[in-house]
Image: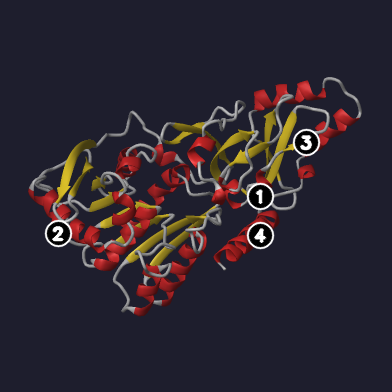
């Protein structure tokens, strides 16, 4: 039964992709013109094409004449006689690997794939040359398969997605601004110190980063922002720089932030999955540790708790467990489809639905491309986030909700966390 449902989900994902994001190859004017020149026998057509793409960079972006909110995006790859297939590895490939395969222009070394995308698109991508074409949900050696994937040699913009992996970046004109992520010499800098925290309840220890604002006054009480996945929020998401910029622009008040790293081994998978001991440790151990051993002064209420992916779920679950402490939640692509072991999917939404309304304010954002039909993702990220939003609204709980044309990636979260902090730190 589960296999039949998975097949149905894959077919549905491909149908939706074809209807909303993909386009016929001829949608690209540039490719159509190249095809005409090649067909007419113009000997320099292909060389001129590659010369032009090296100068103008790729992918090729063309406005959709039928709708100013969309563009046609054409990825190109220069193959050789050994090239059997090329796949554009992006969030769209997770939805449908088959639909992500590039086409070869007959009689040339030009491989291409055209999508129709909303103009707020932002994502990373790579090229898989001579890929096995095994559907991702069936791949058992995923990391080995990733090793030969290549960046776009005609796109100078790249991003370190983690684990030393570098990918090319696609950003359309309407993508959320990255202005808060850019370090500026004229902006006063806060301080970031790394410590170690040991939990008696969890029987492990983890790295901690503490951010203090510029012109920090030890005897002053500050708002506190508590961030999980602190490792990535100090690297792929440059949160200290973002906070510096927000404070300098007076977009938020001076704040303190505690960025919590993950425990050893597989601790994250258990602790961030609506695990009550994690919530208990935050309130009974970590916050007192900040006040006691670190001598930090912050409000006992209205702490903003932040997470992405699985820690987005953990942030919401901690607020559910201790709403008097964590009254504001920022969730970036939270894994709300998940539940504690033995429970049905969407545990948190179900409990919020049957319990009295919580005095919490939520900021929830999700990518429109987070619909991959992965066996343990039931339902999809997008569906689960929309469902939680609807439950919160039905319960009268305050929620700010945003969808972007993006996938499950730090390249997206780093650009939007600033606006989320502005919203939450300036709301009652």
* Residue visible at 89% across and 31% down in the picture: 39
Which is more toward the observer, 386 or 261? 261
N-terminal-most mark, 3 or 4? 4
Quadrant in which the N terminus appears: bottom right
Viewer-nearest of discs 4 and 2? 4
How far apart are the alpha carbons under marks 4 and 2?
A: 47 Å
Mark with earlier residue (4, 2): 4
Horizontal side, residue 219 vs residue 151: left or right = left
Q: Earlier in the sequence, mark 1 or mark 3?
A: 3
Closer to viewer: mark 2 or mark 3: 2
Sequence-wise first label, 4 or 1: 4
At 42% across and 43% down in the image, what residue appears? 414
What's the residue at 62%, 58% (across, down)?
Answer: 10
The residue that disc 4 covers is 11
Query: Given this view, does label 4 or label 1 mark the residue nearer the observer?
Result: 4
Q: Secondary structure at mark 1?
A: strand
Which label number is shown at residue 70? Answer: 1
Q: Secondary structure at mark 4?
A: helix
Task: Tell me the quarter of the picture where residue 265 sits.
Answer: top left
Q: Residues within 10 Å of mark 2 (few under 14, many from 20)?
A: some
Which residue is denoted by mark 2 in the rendering? 284
The answer to whether the residues at label 1 and label 3 have Cβ atoms under 8 Å apart is no
Mark 2 to mark 3: distance in Å?
Answer: 61 Å
Q: Quadrant of residue 299?
A: bottom left
Q: Is residue 239 in sight in this rendering?
A: no
For numbered disc 2, what is the local secondary structure?
helix
Question: On the image, which quarter does residue 232 sit in?
Answer: top left
Residue 169: x percent and y percent?
54, 36
The answer for how far apart the CA atoms under marks 4 and 1 are is 25 Å
CA separation in Å, label 1 and label 3: 18 Å
Q: Could you say which disc has been placed on residue 31 in the image?
A: 3
Q: Which x, y percent locates residue 277?
A: 22, 61
């Amino acid at each position: 039964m589960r296999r039949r449902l998975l097949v149905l989900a894959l077919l549905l994902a491909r149908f939706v992709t074809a209807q909303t994001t993909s386009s016929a190859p001829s949608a690209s004017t540039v490719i159509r013109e190249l095809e005409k020149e090649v067909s007419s026998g113009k000997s320099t057509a292909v060389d001129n094409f590659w010369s032009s793409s090296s100068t103008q960079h790729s992918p090729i972006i063309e406005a959709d004449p039928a709708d100013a909110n969309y563009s046609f995006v054409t990825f190109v790859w220069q193959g050789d006689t050994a090239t059997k297939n090329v796949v554009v590895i992006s969030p769209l490939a997770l939805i449908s690997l088959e639909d992500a395969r590039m086409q070869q222009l007959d009689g040339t070394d030009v491989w291409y794939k055209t999508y129709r995308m909303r103009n707020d698109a932002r994502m990373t991508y790579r090229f898989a040359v001579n890929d096995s074409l095994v559907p991702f949900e069936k791949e058992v050696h995923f990391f080995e398969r990733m090793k030969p994937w290549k960046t776009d040699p005609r796109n100078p913009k790249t991003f370190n997605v983690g684990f030393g992996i570098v990918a090319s970046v696609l950003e359309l004109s309407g993508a959320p601004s990255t202005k808060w992520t850019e370090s500026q010499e004229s902006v006063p800098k806060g301080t970031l110190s790394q410590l170690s925290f040991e939990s008696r309840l969890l029987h492990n220890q983890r790295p901690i980063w503490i951010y203090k604002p510029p012109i920090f006054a030890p005897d002053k009480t500050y708002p506190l922002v508590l961030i999980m996945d602190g490792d990535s929020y100090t690297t792929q998401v440059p949160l200290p720089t973002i906070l510096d910029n927000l404070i300098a622009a007076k977009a938020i008040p001076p704040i303190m932030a505690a960025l919590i790293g993950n425990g050893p081994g597989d601790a994250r998978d258990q602790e961030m999955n609506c695990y009550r001991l994690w919530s208990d440790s935050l309130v009974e151990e970590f916050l007192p540790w900040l006040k006691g051993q670190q001598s930090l002064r912050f409000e006992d209420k209205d702490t903003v708790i932040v997470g992405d992916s699985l820690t987005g779920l953990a942030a919401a679950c901690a607020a559910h467990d201790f709403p008097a402490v964590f009254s504001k939640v920022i969730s970036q692509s939270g894994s709300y489809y998940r539940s504690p072991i033995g429970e049905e999917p969407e545990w948190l939404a179900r409990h919020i639905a049957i319990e009295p309304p919580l005095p919490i304010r939520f900021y929830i954002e999700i990518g429109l491309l987070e619909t991959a039909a992965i066996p343990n993702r039931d339902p999809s990220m997008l569906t689960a986030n929309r469902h939680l939003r609807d439950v919160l609204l039905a319960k009268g709980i305050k929620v700010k909700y945003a969808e972007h044309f993006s996938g499950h990636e730090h390249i997206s979260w780093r650009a939007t966390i600033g606006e989320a902090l502005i919203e939450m730190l300036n709301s009652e």
